[in-house]
Image (cartoon, rainbow, N blue to C red):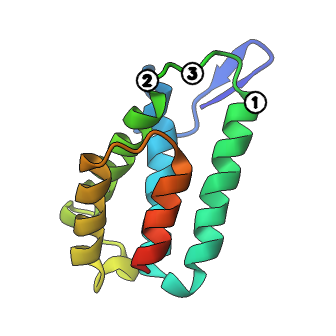
Amino acid sequence: MLVHNNAITVLDFECAIFGDPAHDVGITFAHYFMLAIGKPYWAKKYLACADAFFSAYKDNITFPLPAHFFTNVKNNAAAMMLGRVDGVIDFDYLKNRKVLVRKISKHILLMDFAELAPVILYLSRKM
């Protein structure tokens, strides 16, 4: 969805929701993380993109983030990653990396990451 001139434009009706913004940020992270896992030769660049995205997001939002925001973000990201490797849609670049995606996703869900930097460090060590 795009919000502009006091109006909303829905780009993808399938994914348009109104709720916790951590869901949207988590989905974005999931895609960067899966690309980093599936294409390890570009992992540093994808993880840098995730970091740049989150910095820009925090710099441009107009509401305060709740204390638990990043916990919700990382849980949404991990759940999306698990859904992508075990769901109907098959990403070619993850075919040989599904076990690793599951392992990383479960670790992200179980660990108490309160910010992005430790997640990026963890991911960079797994590539």
In the rendered structure, which disc, 1 or 2, sits on the residue that comes first in sequence?
Answer: 2
Rounded to the nearest whole Å, what is the CA distance between mark 1 and mark 2?
A: 17 Å
At 49% from the left and 82% from the top, the residue drawn is: 39
Task: Confirm or deny contact between disc 1 and disc 2 (CB under 8 A).
Answer: no
Circle 3 or circle 2, nearest the eye: 3
Q: Amino acid at mark 3?
A: Leu
Quadrant hosting residue 81: bottom left
Q: From where the camera sits, is residue 109 visible?
A: yes
Residue 51 in percent (x, y) is at 64, 54
Looking at the image, is mark 3 or mark 2 earlier in the sequence? 2
User: What residue is at 66 percent from the left and 64 percent from the top?
Assistant: 48
- Residue drawn 21% across and 62% down? 88
**Would you say 48 lies left or right of 75 here?**
right
Q: Is residue 13 visible?
A: no
**Residue lying furthest right:** 5
Residue 57 % position (x, y): 68, 37
Residue underneath mark 2: 20
Mark 3 Cα within 10 Å, few/some/many (few <14, many 20+)? few
Local packing at callout 2 (Cα closer than 10 Å; few below 14, some 14-19, many 20+) is few
The tag on residue 60 is: 1
Classify 8 as above or below 45. Answer: above
- Please give left or right for residue 18 compared with residue 94 in the image: right
- Give the structural element (helix, strand or loop) at label 1: helix
Q: Nearer the viewer, residue 80 or 123?
A: 123
Please name the amino acid that badge 2 sits on. Asp
Q: Position of residue 1 (x, y in %)?
A: 59, 32
SS for dot 3: loop
User: CA–CA distance between discs 3 and 1?
Assistant: 12 Å
Which label is found at residue 82? Answer: none
Pointer 3: what residue?
A: 65
Which quadrant: the C terminus? bottom left
